Amino acid sequence: MTYASSLVLQAVASGHPYGFDVMDVTGLPSGTVYPALRKLERSGFVRSRWESERAARKEQRPVRRYYEVTGAGVEVLSEVTKRFRLISKALVPEGSEL
């Protein structure tokens, strides 16, 4: 898994469930975040669902696709945080654990 994909997975695991939110917290561009999310989903590390059009319309914005980490994603995240030590420090608030 690449460092960028690891950052995206960590962001989702830390409670940033949609693409723009992941972009904001990681500083990665959309051309990195969205392909990483698709790859993570194909790999079974995250799953996604579309919010209702009604909810988006109520807030006058486009429909969002929400992501959540799967059990397999939690396991692989544990492995990559050992490899990329800065990931856990960059995105997990102090005192929190995965």
Image (cartoon, rainbow, N blue to C red):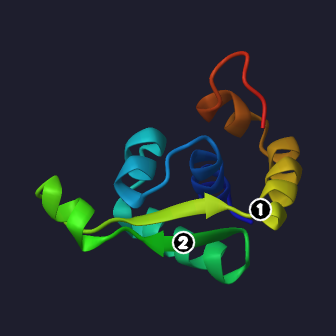
Residue 37: name its quadrant: bottom right
Secondary element under disc 2, as helix, strand or loop, is: strand
| As drawn, 42 above or below 15 | below
Q: Which residue lies furthest to the top in this view?
A: 95
Residue beneath the point at 80% across and 55% down: 74
Q: Is 82 positioned to the left or the right of 49 in the image?
A: right
Q: Quadrant of the C terminus?
A: top right
| Marks 1 and 2, the one that precedes in the sequence | 2
Query: Residue 26: image x %, image y %?
Result: 48, 44
Q: Position of residue 15 (x, y in %)?
A: 56, 43
Residue wearing tag 1:
73
**In the rendered view, does 28 fall on the left or right side of 69?**
left
**Residue farthest left in this picture:** 60
Residue highlighted by disc 2 = 48
Three-letter code, disc 2: Ser
Q: Which residue lies furthest to the bottom in this view?
A: 42
- Position of the N terminus by quadrant: bottom right
Q: Which residue is drawn at 16% across and 52% down?
A: 59
What's the residue at 32%, 70% (across, down)?
52
Q: Is 58 placed left or right of 32 in the picture?
A: left
Question: Tag count in the figure?
Answer: 2
Residue drawn at (62%, 71%) of the image: 47
Q: Is residue 7 or residue 51 the one in the foreground?
A: 51
Instruction: Determine the CA span between mark 1 and mark 2.
Output: 13 Å
Residue 61 in view (yes/no): no
Residue 90 visible here = yes
Indicate the amino acid at tag 1: Gly
In the figure, 92 relative to 39: above or below?
A: above
Secondary structure of the residue carrying tag 1 is helix
